[in-house]
Amino acid sequence: MLRPVRGRLAPSPTGHLHLGNIWAFLLCWLGVRSQGGRLVLRMEDIDPERSRQAYADDIMRDLEWLGIDWDEGPDCGGPYAPYTQSERLDRYAEVIERLTAEGLTFPCFCTRKELRSLASAPHVGEAGPAYPGTCLHLTQDQREARRAAGRAPALRLHGTCETIAFTDRIRGPISTCWQECGGDFPIRRSDGVIAYQLAVAVDDVDQRITQVVRGDDILHCTPRQLYIHQLLDAPAPEYAHVPLVLDAGGERLAKRHKHFEIRALRQGGARAQAIIGDLAHRAGLAPAGTTCTPQDLVHGFTFDAIPKAPIVLEHDIEERLTRMV
Ligand code: GLU
């Protein structure tokens, strides 16, 4: 059955939005709007130490200023509210309980350091060395002994699938094995914080997301998330992993790139339409020098023109954006 198109903008409120975030959000927005679908804004504040409400507020303001809107979200509610991860902890706990009852999880007492020293595994993909299975077959007594010694366990999800395959809208067919994806992975950290993989997959299922557009730095997480979809008997969304945005030196944009933040560009005098037009040009959707709104790009939008190689921002981009009227 064809499901109504639903996409999501899923920022982590751990900093301000920069051009790299907006690149992915614009393409996500266009993918959904060009098919007449609905957009969810989801605040991924699952990590309490790094997330701040002030960032969440600024993120919404920046998106609005750029003309990237949403239909459901923390500010306006919707049929699958709440849309803030920290308000969904009971739901994640329920899923963890279900997976545990099915015998699919196990406590892992290994520290990061221990795992690093064990990491001789032949499969080292982007997900890092595969989990060597150290705590998978501990007996109940061994688990109790470790708990008694004061060790708090993480909870890992045990994989029973050999190969996970999907077709990415931009990268084409992808097929990978469980070990290449990092093997049995944590769904709850030892400090009790829910892992990103679990929260994102459960949210995508519950919020009926049919289309995920995001940076290809997360591509290696997708098989793990698809596995959770399978376990929850939920249909898989379609994925489009867009190339990353890099600075002129080839580094991916990060917190220290303050000058590429939307609010810095705005304060420097850049217009929203200049920023959108520049990104549209890089996506193969408009000629150089275009100024436009996201809405102007909806008609005829296609992922086909989007390059597969990373987007490199030139040294003088802020100046250029600021000069464009
Ligand atoms: N919240 C994640 C981030 O900002 C994105 C997660 C996703 O799109 O699946 O990096």
Image (cartoon, rainbow, N blue to C red):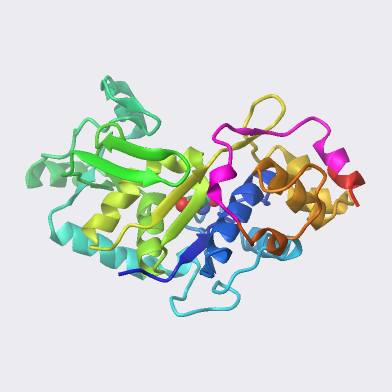
Question: Observer-nearest residue: 282 or 108?
Answer: 282
Magenta-colored span: 301-320
- Classify 1 as above or below 319: below
User: Left or right of 150: which side holds 139?
Assistant: left
- Classify 57 as above or below 306: below
Dividing the picture into quadrants, the one containing residue 307 is: top right
User: Left or right of 68: which side holds 104?
Assistant: left
Residue 131 image position (x, y, % from top left): 26, 33
User: Left or right of 137: which side holds 319?
Assistant: right
Residue drawn at 45 percent across, 58 percent down = 211
Question: Observer-nearest residue: 271 or 156?
Answer: 271
Residue 73 image position (x, y, % from top left): 55, 72
- Classify 215 as above or below 87: above
User: Left or right of 277: which side holds 196?
Assistant: left
Instruction: Assess whether residue 314 is covered by the magenta stretch.
Output: yes
State whether residue 43 appears in this view. no
State whether residue 210 appears in this view. yes
- Classify 70 as above or below 108: below
Residue 222 image position (x, y, % from top left): 37, 46
Dividing the picture into quadrants, the one containing residue 12 is: bottom right
Residue 180 image position (x, y, % from top left): 29, 31
